[in-house]
């Protein structure tokens, strides 16, 4: 997921944006994408074994 990689690049330390709303938004988006990636990987493994 390139979106997850890009949100990692635009973290608070590298962008030097010190707004609290940006930090909250960044953490929410980054964690949501990481969780979605785990669920999609699990779904992919399930589907790949179900159709073998």
Image (cartoon, rainbow, N blue to C red):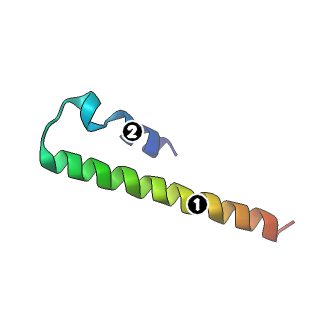
Give the left or right position of residue 17, taking residue 33 as reference: left
**Residue at horizontal 17 percent and vertical 35 percent from the top:** 17
| Image spot of residue 10 (x, y percent) | 32, 35
Image quarter where the C terminus lies is: bottom right
Say the numbered circle drawn on residue 1.
none
| Image spot of residue 12 (x, y percent) | 25, 37
Residue that protrudes farthest toward the right in the picture: 52
**Residue at horizontal 13 percent and vertical 47 percent from the top:** 20
| Image spot of residue 22 (x, y percent) | 19, 46
The residue tagged 1 is: 40
- The reply to whether dot 2 and dot 1 touch (C-beta < 8 Å) is no
**Residue at horizontal 53 percent and vertical 55 percent from the top:** 37
Mark 1, other Cα within 10 Å: few <14 / some 14–19 / many ≥20:
few
Residue that protrudes farthest toward the bottom in the picture: 50
Give the left or right position of residue 50, taking residue 24 as reference: right
The residue tagged 2 is: 8
Label 2, label 1: how far apart the Cα atoms are:
19 Å
């Amino acid at each position: 997921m390139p979106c997850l990689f890009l949100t990692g690049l635009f973290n608070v330390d590298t962008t030097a944006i010190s707004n609290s709303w940006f930090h909250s938004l960044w953490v929410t988006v980054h964690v949501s994408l990481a969780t979605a990636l785990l669920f999609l990987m699990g779904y992919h493994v399930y589907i790949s074994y179900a159709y073998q």
